[in-house]
Image (cartoon, helix red, strand yellow):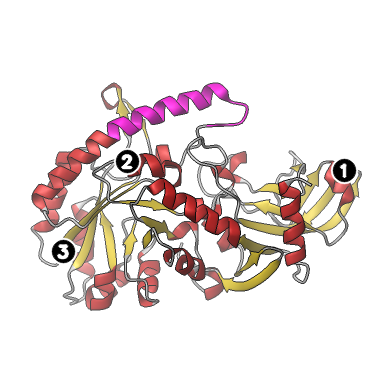
Amino acid sequence: MTARAADRARYDRATAHLDAPVAIVDLEAFDANADDLVSRAGGKPVRVASKSVRCRALLERVLARDGFAGIMSYTLAESLWLARSGFDDVLLAYPSADRAGFAELAADPKLAAAVTVMVDDPAQLDLIEAARAGGREVVRVCLELDTSLKLLGGRVRVGALRSPRHSPAQLAELARSVSRRPGFQVVGIMAYEGHVAGVGDALAGRPLRSRAIRLMQSAARRELAERRAAAVRAVREVVPGLEFVNGGGTGSVQHTAAEDAVTEIAAGSGLYVPRLFDNYTSFSGRPAALFAQPVVRRPGVGMVTVLGGGYPASGAAGADRSPVPYLPEGLRYDPREGAGEVQTPLLGAPADDLLIGDKVWFRHAKAGELCERFETLHLVEGDRVTATVPTYRGEGRTFL
C-alpha cells in the first residue's frame, strides 16, 4: 500500500460516520508543516497569515507552538474581531477603506494596541483621519515596500502590483509623512516578495520555464536583499524605534530569513500545503487540508460523478486554480466539464472500484479559501476525528 493509499484508508475510517461533503485537517501533517516553517525560519519568528488558515482554533494551535508569533490578517474587520478574541498582535497586510472599522480602532485602547494597519500612500492616512469620529487612540502603522524586480530601466516589471513605494527614499519619505501627523506611529515595514514566495519553480513537464523562474527568483532575491536593507536603514533614520521588518512567504522562508534586515517571516499556506505549493524546490510539505465529495453516479466504465466540487481559487483563471482529485490516486477531470457547481464527473480506472456514497478526496488549489466552502473542519489524528472546529464561515464571519 502506498503512503497516499494509507492516508485514504485513514481518512475514510476517521470520517465513516460523516456524510460528505466534508473537510478535514490532518493534525500530524499540520504540525509537521509547522515544524518545517520554524526550521526554515532559522530562529526568526513566523507570523501566521490568517487568510491561509481561516479557523480560530487552528490559529490558536499554531501560535501556541515555539517559533510562531503574531497574525497577519487580511481585512480590518477581521483584525478587530481577532483582537477582541484575544489575539494581541495583528498586522493587517493590506490597506483598508473600512471607515467604520477605523472609527472603532481609534476609539478603543485595546484594539489600537493590538492592531497595526498597512499604509503605502498619504491618502490612506487622510481616510483614517477622517474616519476617526472623535477617537483619539494612536494608530499603529506599517509601511509597505514594493518588492517587484524592475529590469531594462523599469520597462519590464516582475512581481505583484502592490505598493507604489519602490525605493528606499520613497519609503523614508512616507515614514516622514506619517511621523508628521499626530495620532499615527510607524512601527514596522512589510515587503512581500510574492514572485519568489508564491511562484513555484519546479513545474511538472516544463523544465525550461522552471529554469527561467529559478533564474528570475535568484536575481530577484539578490536585488531585493540589497534594496530592503537600504530601505530599513532609511526608515530607521526617521523612526529609530521601528519594531519589526516583515518579509517572505511559505515558498521563500529560508531565503528571506537569511537577510539581516528582516526580523520576522510571514507564512500560512505552508501549514495546509495546497496543490499550488507542490511545485517548489525550496521545500516539500505534507498535504494537511482536504475535502471529500460523495460519489452519486456511475455514468459508465471508468467514470463516476461526485456531488459539487467546483471550488476555484482566486488568481488568474486557469486549470491550476481548480481543486485536484487526490484520493484515490489516478482520477482526473473530464476536460469538457471540469469541476462543476453541483456535480463533477471524474475519469480513470479507480472509478470502477468506487461505490455510490464513497468519498473522493480533493486538495484545494489554495489554502484558506477552502474554508469559505465549509462551516467546520474535522481534525484527524491517526484514523479518528478528535475534534470538530468552526471555520470563519462557521462562526458567521465572511470578511472578504
Nearer-N-terminus badge (1/2): 2
CB-based contact (under 8 Å), mark 1 and mark 3: no
Badge 1 amino acid = Gly
Residue 74: which quarter of the image? bottom left
**Could you tell me if residue 67 is visible in this image?**
yes
Residue in the image at 48% along x and 50% along y:
36
Q: Which residue is mark 3?
A: 184
Farthest-out residue, right: 301
Position of 270 with respect to 87 (left or right) is right
**Could you tell me if residue 369 is visible in this image?**
no
The disc at residue 258 is 2
Q: Where are the magenta residues, as a range?
A: 202-224
Q: Is residue 198 above or below residue 82?
A: above
Position of 154 with respect to 28 (left or right) is left
Measured from the top left, where is residue 292 in percent x and y?
71, 59
CB-based contact (under 8 Å), mark 2 and mark 3: no
The disc at residue 318 is none
Q: Is residue 151 magenta?
A: no
Position of 52 with respect to 374 (left or right) is left
Q: Which residue is mark 1?
A: 302
Residue in the image at 78% along x and 67% along y:
16
Q: Is residue 205 magenta?
A: yes
State which mark lies toward you, 1 or 2.
Answer: 2
Badge 3 amino acid = Phe
State which mark lies toward you, 2 or 3.
Answer: 2
Q: Nearer the viewer, residue 230 or 38?
A: 38
Q: Is residue 371 above or below residue 316?
A: below
Q: What secondary structure predominates along the stretch shown in magenta?
A: helix
Badge 2 amino acid = Ala
